[in-house]
Image (cartoon, rainbow, N blue to C red):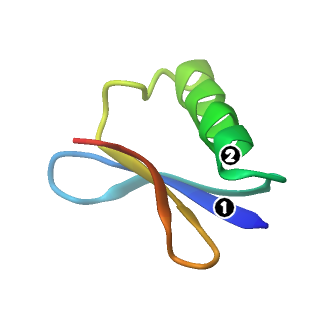
Amino acid sequence: MNYVLTVFDKTGEKLLEETFDAATEKEAKEIGEKMLQEKNYQDTTHRCTSSAGKLVLFHR
């Protein structure tokens, strides 16, 4: 399944939007968290959603 990780600044502007594949929601959450850490966005507003529209990761 496809997932999209999006990071926003305080004004709502997108700082990052990356699409990736994962077999499960758990795997998608782990991949998303790793991507956030690599780009130093773990404390910035972000979300990760599935192609079905389900929210699997969120931070505000």
Front one among 15 and 45:
45
Q: Is residue 44 left or right of residue 56?
A: left
Q: Which residue is mark 2?
A: 28
Going by the numbered disc 1, the residue's amino acid type is: Tyr
* Sequence-earlier tag: 2 or 1: 1
Q: Secondary structure under badge 1?
A: strand
Relative image position of residue 31 (x, y in whole percent): 69, 36
Q: Position of residue 57 (x, y in %)?
A: 45, 46
Q: Residue at x 60, y 61 (%)?
A: 4
Query: In the drawing, what numbered circle is on residue 3?
Result: 1
Question: From what the image shows, is residue 9 above or below residue 36?
Answer: below
Identify the residue at image location x=22%, y=59%.
12
Q: Quadrant of residue 59?
A: top left
For disc 1, the neighbor class at 10 Å (few under 14, some 14 to 19, many from 20) is: many
Q: Find residue 13 and report its image quarter.
A: bottom left
Residue nearest the observer in this picture, 7 or 31: 31
